Image (cartoon, rainbow, N blue to C red):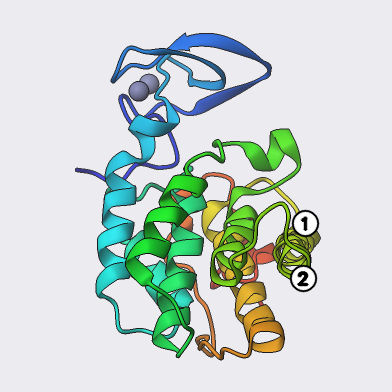
């Protein structure tokens, strides 16, 4: 399979977004859903069809990795052809990479159970939540990570505060850079915040690379180029 360029998986045409959702039929499974996006040729692929294989790749990779570095885990998962440039698989992938690195860095966790829960919760966050809800799914994924490792629920006290604080810190970090969305940039930024947070609040020290350089920007038509902290053109 050829890697897509953040565009239609059927024909490669760019996506167009609508302010108001319309009913559309998925070009793969033929079920109908309300959606704000389709390609210029009229193709629509539902979130489940878009991310199914990618999420299997994420689960398998996170079960096996011995790494304590969630960015390194993400970068290796992102190389897989079923993990697309942009897409809701990132809403599962960020938290899954964090769960694996957290366990490998000494955090107490039943990884198999935690990953299953991550996949279940993360898949409920739709594509486009960043621009339509004001709440990027990669950031939500860090909140789900903290919720799972602390065992939080809506009735919790301290852990309720922790998981909401996690999401808010990740959102602040990526809001400071601004849009348009990039699932790679936002995954890296949210993950950096989660590593700092886990060190500070949960007493588990995961690792970060000395320098993070994005290898995916040629596939992103809306890359911020030198304004993105991970683009090779970025200085400082
Ligand atoms: Zn198309
Ligand atoms: Zn579908």
Q: Which of 178 and 24 is in front in this view?
A: 24
Residue 198 place in picture, x, y as percent: 63, 81
Per the model, the C-alpha gap separating discs 1 and 2 is 26 Å
Residue 108 place in picture, x, y as percent: 46, 82
Q: Mark 2 points at which residue?
A: 158
Which residue is situated farthest in the front direction here? Answer: 155
Residue 187 place in picture, x, y as percent: 55, 61
Q: Nearer the viewer, residue 204 or 185?
A: 204
Question: Is the residue at mark 1 in contact range of ligand 1, meaning its CB lies under 8 Å from it?
Answer: no
Q: What element carries label 2?
A: helix
Residue 8 vertical placement versus 65 (above, below): above
Q: Which residue is drawn at 54% across and 64% down?
A: 148
Among numbered discs 1 and 2, the one appearing first in the sequence:
2
Question: Is the residue at mark 2 in contact range of ligand 2, meaning its CB lies under 8 Å from it?
Answer: no
The answer to whether residue 28 is visible is yes
Q: Quadrant of ligand 1?
A: top left
Residue 196 vertical placement versus 228 (above, below): below
Q: Is residue 7 left or right of residue 226?
A: left
Q: Is residue 72 left or right of residue 20?
A: left
Q: Which of 134 and 92 is in front in this view?
A: 92
User: In the rendered image, which quarter is residue 231 located in?
Assistant: bottom right
Q: Residue at x 43, y 59 (%)?
A: 216
The answer to whether residue 80 is visible is no
Tag 1 and tag 2, C-beta contact below 8 Å: no
User: In the rendered image, which quarter is residue 59 located in?
Assistant: bottom left
Q: What element carries label 1?
A: helix
Q: Name the residue under label 1.
A: 175
Q: In this view, does 190 lie to the left or right of 10?
A: right
Point out which mark residue 16 bears: none
Q: Residue at x 40, y 17 (%)?
A: 43
Residue 20 place in picture, x, y as percent: 69, 15
Q: Which residue is drawn at 44% across and 58% down?
A: 93
């Amino acid at each position: 399979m050829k890697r897509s360029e953040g565009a239609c998986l059927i024909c490669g045409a760019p996506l167009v977004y609508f302010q108001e959702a319309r009913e559309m039929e998925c070009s793969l499974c033929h079920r109908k859903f309300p959606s704000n996006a389709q390609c210029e040729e009229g193709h629509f692929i539902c979130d489940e069809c878009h991310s199914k294989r990618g999420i299997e790749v994420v689960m398998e990779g996170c079960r096996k990795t011995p790494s304590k570095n969630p960015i390194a885990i993400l970068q290796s998962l992102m190389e897989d052809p079923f993990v697309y440039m942009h897409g809701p698989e990132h809403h599962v992938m960020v938290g899954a990479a964090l769960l694996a690195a957290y366990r490998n860095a000494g955090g107490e966790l039943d990884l198999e159970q935690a990953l299953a829960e991550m996949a279940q919760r993360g898949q409920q966050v739709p594509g486009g939540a960043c621009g339509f809800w004001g709440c990027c799914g990669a950031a939500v994924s860090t909140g789900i990570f903290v919720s799972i490792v602390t065992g939080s629920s809506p009735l919790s006290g301290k852990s309720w505060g922790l998981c909401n604080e996690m999401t808010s810190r990740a959102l602040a970090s990526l809001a400071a850079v601004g849009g348009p969305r990039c699932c790679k940039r936002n995954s890296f930024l949210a993950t950096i915040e989660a590593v700092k947070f886990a060190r500070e609040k949960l007493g588990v020290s995961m690792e970060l690379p000395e320098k993070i350089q994005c290898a995916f920007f040629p596939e992103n038509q809306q890359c911020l180029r030198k304004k993105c902290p991970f683009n090779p053109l970025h200085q400082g």
